[in-house]
Image (tube, grey):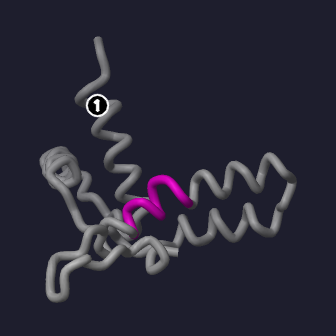
Amino acid sequence: LARNLVVGSPVPGGQSLLGDGRAREIVVNAVLPALHAIAFQEQRWALAERAFALYRDHPRLPGNGIEREVRRMLQRAGRPSVATTARGQQGLLYLYRMLVTRPS
């Protein structure tokens, strides 16, 4: 899926307009969840399960500042993060939103 989203440079030797890393982020954060939801709604169970399996097993994406901060927070609390997949990384972002940005 990600390879199909990559857009090379319009100039030979130039920087890609959409590289592999960003394409993988789009697949994990948008394409696979949307595909799963549509397949589920249309009762296409094999497709829904395949989309979920690809999401569940997708390797880690490049880290970011929020993920690093949540890892530090968990480590200080004696609960080191073991997020080894993109799904686990999404869980760390969810924790951040729930623990840090949630209004009181």
In the image: residue 68, left or right of residue 99: left
Local SS, label 1: helix
Rendering coords of residue 101 (x, y %)? 26, 26
Q: Is residue 26 magenta?
A: yes
Name the residue located 19 percent from the left edge and 47 percent from the top edge: 66
**Residue at 24% in and 58% down:** 80
Q: Main secondary structure of the magenta part?
A: helix
**Quarter of the view holding residue 51:** bottom right
Query: Residue sitting at 37 percent across and 62 percent down?
Result: 25
The image shows residue 28, relative to residue 19, as above or below, that is above
Relative to residue 5, is residue 44 drawn left or right?
Answer: right
74 or 93, nearer to the observer = 93
Q: Residue furthest top?
A: 104
The quadrant of the picture occupied by the C terminus is top left
Residue identified by numbered label 1:
99
The magenta span reads: 24-31
Q: Which residue reaches farthest right?
A: 43
Q: Amino acid at mark 1?
A: Leu
Residue 22 is drawn in which quadrant?
Answer: bottom left
Q: Percent from the top left, x then y, of residue 81?
A: 28, 59
Residue 73 drawn above or below residue 71: above
**Residue in the picture at 76% in, 67% down:** 47
Mark 1 neighbour class, 10 Å CA radius: few under 14, some 14 to 19, many 20 or more = few
**Number of numbered markers:** 1
Displayed quadrant of residue 99: top left
Closer to us: 24 or 72: 24
- Where's residue 98, x and y in %? 34, 31
Residue 77 lies in magenta, yes or no? no
Q: Residue furthest front?
A: 11
Please provide percent x and percent y for residue 17.
26, 68
Q: Is residue 102 above or below residue 35?
A: above
